[in-house]
Amino acid sequence: MSDIQRAPKGTFDRLPPESAAYLAARDTLVAPLLTAGYGYVETPVFEETAVFSRGVGESTDVVSKEMYTFADRGGRSLTLRPEFTAGVMRAFIEHRLYAGALPAKLWTVGSAFRYERPQAGRYRHFTQVSVEALGVDDPALDAELVALADAGFRGLGLADYDLQLTSLGDATCRPQYRELLTSFLAGLDLDEETRRRAGINPLRVLDDKRPEVQAQLVDAPLLVDHLSDSTKAHYDAVRQHLSDLGVTWVEAPRLVRGLDYYTKTTFEFVHRGLGAQASIGGGGRYDGLSAALGGPDVSGIGYAVGVDRTILAAQAEGLDIAVTSGIDVFVVHLGEEAKRFAVGLVGQLRAAGVAADTVYGGRGLKGAMKAADRSGAARVVVVGDRDLAEGVAQVKTMATGEQVAVPLTELADSLRASV
Ligand code: AMP
């Protein structure tokens, strides 16, 4: 196969019938938000590159290695969104949502793009449900978001995952901890590249997956042991609210997420049935993001769920999440008159909310019955010119094979009543 007959590396097509699982997963993940006052927002698929380089952070893999950045014909540097939060924050600032009712509760869903090494559960084009509550710093809001993400997963029937939770401190305690960690890291045997990253953001080194690095980090100081009083109180309150909401979590003091903007509450949902790419969602509070993008100094909290990976997690748990968007009634026609009748009947049924289909392209009876079978329709109407002349159509119930002649005048009503 040549390249023009293949989706680009790291991308895939969603095709029916499996695509039904995608829609069901997406809608189930979103459902809790619709009961909690979150409004839908849509931002462009690309933004000025600086939105992400400043918003997500220069030291992150996402910005330093994974962005799809290009110059448009006007010479602007644009980037396909690698995540949603920076763009949503840009919109919050541009439209002065901070001057309105706060928190601004927003959700979105769509494509994100990262130039990553593709593997199971890791793609270059993937889908996220992304949720933000902007402009208010209240631990109860942190707990609300965590609980909503959790409710989305539970709604799909997922059970085999952990909610990992920690606090990444704030501007009062993080700099001190950073110094502590930096001097600890200085005593380790690290390669040039890792040292460079440690210089930009030492916390990122804690996230290094290589065993030789992890082995050296066993005694690394942990931020949770160095939280300021106010940050600690915030974290305690978040945990209290989570308990009240019936959400369970595990403490994850080494959790550092792939994006630089997180402060205070930080969390990740990790599925036990997935391989290396086990994170199905995550997020946290970000105090500096608005200001980093030139907006007011307001706090926000958000999370993103990977829809594709959530589907893999559901499969790993043996869950059937696809809602069959199948056909209720299939109409098979034989003859010119019967075809006209069939097309009209299908239109009438659809208008009445019955999922209906017929056969196109002049296939013989055998082909038409095969198509009827494949459609999954519970009822198949067979109508020929001779039936029409007699004023009836044959209605076959596929489960039993039973077939009855129904008068044309009663046909639509009887089919509608049967679904
Ligand atoms: P992040 O924006 O990095 O916090 O990621 C949030 C969620 O998006 C992750 O938990 C994954 O479920 C999903 N995700 C991130 N990167 C990818 C990718 N390359 N392919 C598929 N899903 C991804």
Image: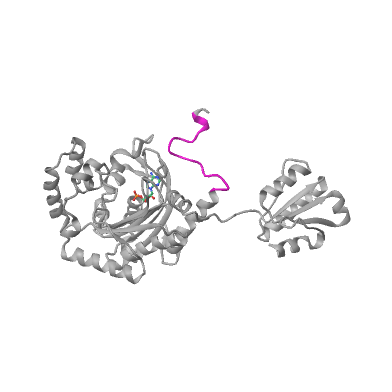
In this rendering, the answer to whether 230 lies above or below 319 is below
Q: Is residue 326 left or right of residue 148?
A: right
Residue at 40% over, 49% down: 274
User: In which quadrant of the rendered view does residue 200 lie?
Assistant: top left
Residue at 24% over, 67% down: 236
Depth check: give the residue in front, 101 or 148. Answer: 148
> How many marks overall?
0
Depth check: give the residue in front, 275 or 284. Answer: 275
Depth check: give the residue in front, 396 or 134. Answer: 396
What x and y, as percent, mark residue 193?
A: 21, 36
Q: Residue furthest top?
A: 2
The magenta stretch is 3-18
**Colour pattern:** one colour
Quadrant the C terminus occupies: bottom right
In this rendering, the answer to whether 9 lies above or below 332 is above
In this rendering, the answer to whether 275 lies above or below 224 is above
What x and y, as percent, mark residue 25?
A: 48, 55
Instruction: Work out whether residue 339 can be spotted.
Output: no
Q: Is residue 350 left or right of residue 48?
A: right
Q: Residue furthest bottom?
A: 244
What x and y, as percent, mark residue 208?
A: 25, 44
Secondary structure mainly formed by the magenta segment: loop
Depth check: give the residue in front, 233 or 53. Answer: 233
Taking the magenta stretch, the answer to whether it contains residue 14 is yes
Q: Is residue 152 left or right of residue 96?
A: right
Taking the magenta stretch, the answer to whether it contains residue 88 is no
Q: Is residue 346 left or right of residue 51?
A: right
Instruction: Work out whether residue 154 can be spotted.
Output: yes
What x and y, as percent, mark residue 384?
A: 83, 49
